[in-house]
Image: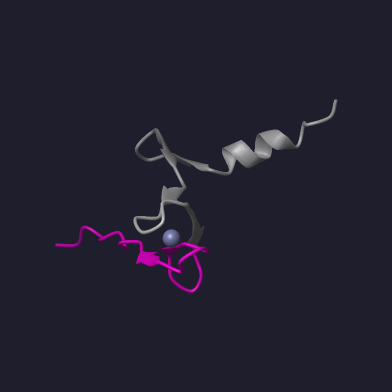
Amino acid sequence: MAGSSRRRGLWSLFEYDYKAGTIRLKAEYCPRCRSIMALHREPVARWYCGKCHYTEYVRARRRAST
Ligand SMILES: [Zn+2]
């Protein structure tokens, strides 16, 4: 029964998009040092690399307002 908590770790890397009906990989790799980056949502959504401190801001969704 050991290792049942490991499943959560895998799934936390994925995000299910209900609108598009697709599963996306939440993790991204750092373009500088190739290590995995973490997604931070506060105060602004951004990818952050803990190794080289590279930060990439997530593009905000544009609302289709006419
Ligand atoms: Zn990096």
Quadrant of the displayed image that contains ligand 1: bottom left
Question: Is 20 above or below relative to 48?
Answer: above
On-image quarter of the N terminus: top right
Question: Is 64 above or below relative to 19?
Answer: below
Of all residues, the one furthest to the top in this rendering is 1
In terms of depth relative to the viewer, which is nearer, 65 or 56? 56
Q: Residue 44 lies in magenta, yes or no?
A: yes
Q: Residue at x 52, y 64 (%)?
A: 50
Q: How many marks?
A: 0
Q: Where on the picture, by quarter, is residue 64? A: bottom left
Of all residues, the one furthest to the bottom in this rendering is 43
Residue 58 percent coordinates (x, y) = 35, 61
The secondary structure that most of the magenta stretch takes on is: loop
On-image quarter of the C terminus: bottom left
In terms of depth relative to the viewer, which is nearer, 54 or 57? 54
Q: Is residue 62 left or right of residue 30?
A: left
Q: Where on the picture, by quarter, is residue 7? A: top right
Range drawn in magenta: 41-66
Q: Residue at x 51, y 70 (%)?
A: 42
Residue 53 percent coordinates (x, y) = 46, 69
Residue 56 percent coordinates (x, y) = 36, 64
Q: Is residue 18 left or right of residue 2?
A: left
Of all residues, the one furthest to the left in this rendering is 66
Q: Where on the picture, by quarter, is residue 47? A: bottom left
Q: Residue 1 lies in magenta, yes or no?
A: no
In terms of depth relative to the viewer, which is nearer, 58 or 18? 58
Q: Residue at x 48, y 74 (%)?
A: 43
